[in-house]
Image: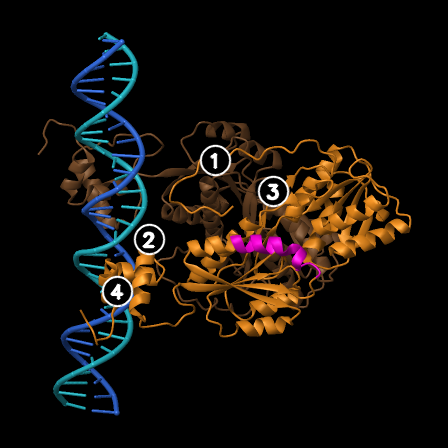
Chain colours: A brown, B orange, C blue, D cyan
Amino acid sequence: MKTAKKLTLRDIAQAAGVSPATVSLVLNGKGDIPGVTRARVLEAVARLNYVPRSLKGGSEGGGETLRFLKISKHGHTVNRDHSVFISDYIDGMSAEATRRNYTLEVVSFEGQAISAVAESLAGAPISGVIALGTELTEDDIRLIQGIGFPTVFIDTFYDVVDANFVDMNNEDAVYKVLSRFRSHGFQRIGFVASHVDTTNFRLRQDAFFKNMARLGLKVRESDVLSIESTHDGAYEDTRVLMEGGLDLADCYFCTNDIIAYGFMKALKEFGVRVPADVSIIGFDNLPQSATTEPSLTTIEVSKRKIGYLAVTILDDLINAAESQPSVKMLVGADLVLRASDGQDVPRPRAMPHKARAVKRQPAE
Amino acid sequence: MKTAKKLTLRDIAQAAGVSPATVSLVLNGKGDIPGVTRARVLEAVARLNYVPRSLKGGSEGGGETLRFLKISKHGHTVNRDHSVFISDYIDGMSAEATRRNYTLEVVSFEGQAISAVAESLAGAPISGVIALGTELTEDDIRLIQGIGFPTVFIDTFYDVVDANFVDMNNEDAVYKVLSRFRSHGFQRIGFVASHVDTTNFRLRQDAFFKNMARLGLKVRESDVLSIESTHDGAYEDTRVLMEGGLDLADCYFCTNDIIAYGFMKALKEFGVRVPADVSIIGFDNLPQSATTEPSLTTIEVSKRKIGYLAVTILDDLINAAESQPSVKMLVGADLVLRASDGQDVPRPRAMPHKARAVKRQPAE
DNA sequence: CTCGCGCTTGTTTACTAAACATGGGGAGGA
DNA sequence: TCCTCCCCATGTTTAGTAAACAAGCGCGAG
């Protein structure tokens, strides 16, 4: 047994009762090593104070690192009201990052200049970047892209910017909402937009007008409202509209759930019953939507799927031997039927397909 | 040595000089078995006439099967002029299918009803479908989708149909073309469309008008032409236009390369010099574009990348334990600079990134 | 004839042997 | 004393397998 000599990986292997190959794989986050074996190896490393030869290249105990930039420029949409879907994005990314032997680190930027975000990347010991694009402009994206790391932007979409995007399919989503309202026989279909300018909000508004036309429906200018996108802001702005004598449409598609909550709360205070007097559909399927009074019919887009796909695309970029064409991906939406649009019974989910063993599955 | 007894997998293992596990992995197309070992096993199987217990589930010697439907309804776009990009799609799919232990089979349909295509799928021993959507309508897609197999459509795009698409980003592509023309200082920018109605052609036309507006450029109605999309048809239609006294624009974006070839040929016959008198850009980067006189500046979208991504998405669908949201993917375009738009020297490709070992790479 | 049990056959995962790559140390020469 | 080269030690990765597990078949008993 070596006493004064420097520890090697073979010593750890002996201590842990495994082969040197296994120790190497564990330390490098590679291979298919079950948790119990991995734990045994790591315990031996700790107990014997083994220091691997090189600690360069990022965090200890992992392979390469992906950095998720949670960017909140102004906070109107990336805020605590929405922390649940940030969490969903991270869950989807994390699961797939782990599966591909990446470490996912999360860095938050609140109110900081995008130049500061970009600067934080220069020289960072990471392999790729996933950036939350909710509040980013086209210029912001070019700036972050320009640092040079393989980068994927989520929760935003610019069709002519040479960058990689994974977003929800707002077109598909809005079409489903409007189809739903039309199936109820509504004539005056309203839209509650937001003052706040994000790409998804703008895409949703464009999609609203486009799909109203596609479905042969007319838009009355006064049925398109614009309110603040925080809960309190949405509530206050709706009260002001109601106090100003708003002529309500048959139904409203709200550009996100938070707006829908504030909107409904204010309507209730003015004696307007949802869905009896006015039908409401939201967007995002925040957990609270199941418990609002009435429960909110809303659009769900799997953010875990978006996170999963972002990592998938980023991994391809990292591994590509040469420059890849930019890829833009839209994930389809589901309409979750609850009470607020006048629906009686929510329908069960689709029957599951038989799972295939071994192959990687998207986290859901 | 067993003589009259039934052969088992262990006999093959002994004959091939490997373990039963290895034989099982080879026969099931699993594990990381190098070619030389795989060949040894398969040779022993053949020599001893070993018949695995079950031959169900598709073709022998492979895992599951994906079926590529090469659908040519009318042949105006899916024809021999375009066989090179069908080949590129198949290359991209095949490489990735093989990497994921699928067999890719190709079935051609020429002039057949989509109902016949759909019927051919019912009960087929396959796991998933990739369909060439070039000439398919929305109803065609719903019909094929309705058979129930996990399905991905390539070379087409419908934003509100609940199906999976991988297409080129026409928006991005057209934006690049028009930006190019504008950088040349052209005022009258023309578009050569096609009589033939495919989704990509329509998307390109929409993108033309949209991006002309985006770039602050006016469209003169007479600068938007519409001709046949086969080489001869494009040539004839252009001759007719020229004989009718066409007032040429400064430049034309042709909706595909075949149209560009026919267009340029006819222009030449009327003494119009390309690019001196009129600048031309095509779309598709067919191999011939490098050797036309003048060589054609054109849009390239990696069809191998599209094929690769289609298999990636399909594999996820096949493996998913439950119903997945539909995914729509757009692959970015590159402008390949040659002579026909007045460019002097084509710029070199981007410097390659260092390849990372083991991880799967998209075929390119 | 049917059911249950045991054994045989095939499958899959967790791990390693061994080949390979990389880095460090020692020796020799300038 | 420094630099270079070679050899050995250390770490890494791939190509397989041991062994556990799953599935199926055959035989015997009820």
Quarter holding the N terminus of chain B is bottom left
Q: Nearer the viewer, residue C27 or B90?
A: C27
Label located before the other in sequence (2 or 4): 4
Contact, CB < 8 Å: mark 4 with mark 3? no
- Give the mark, 1 or 2, whose residue is nearer the N terminus: 2
Callout in the foreground (3, 2): 2
Q: Which mark is residue B353?
A: 1
Question: SS for tag 3?
Answer: loop
- The answer as to whether the residues below labels 4 and 3 share one chain is no
Does dot 1 land on a helix, a strand or a loop?
A: loop
- Gap between marks 1 and 2 measured at Cα: 30 Å
Query: What separation in Å lies between label 4 and label 3 (alpha carbons)?
Result: 63 Å
Mark 1 and mark 4: span between their CA atoms? 44 Å
Q: Is residue A173 magenta?
A: no
Residue tagged 4: B12
Few, some or many residues within 10 Å of mark 2 (<14, 14–19, 20+)? few
* Marks 1 and 3, how far apart at CA: 33 Å
Task: Answer few, some or many: residues within 10 Å of disc 4's Cα (few below 14, many 20 plus, some between 14 and 19).
Answer: many
Q: Which residues are magenta?
A: B76-91
Query: Where in the figure is residue A75, as x and y percent of width and height?
Result: 54, 38
Residue wearing tag 3: A198
The disc label shown at residue B36, or none? 2
- Judged from the image, the secondary structure of the residue bearing numbered disc 4 is helix
The quadrant holding residue D16 is: bottom left
- Horizontally, residue A303 falls left or right of residue B169, namely left
Q: Quadrant of residue B130?
A: bottom right
Q: Nearer the viewer, residue A120 or A149?
A: A149
Distance from disc 2 to disc 4, alpha carbons, whole Å, reads 16 Å
Residue flagged by tag 2: what amino acid is it? Answer: Val
Give the residue type that dot 1 points to. His
Question: Do the residues indicated by labels 1 and 2 lie within the same chain of the protein?
Answer: yes
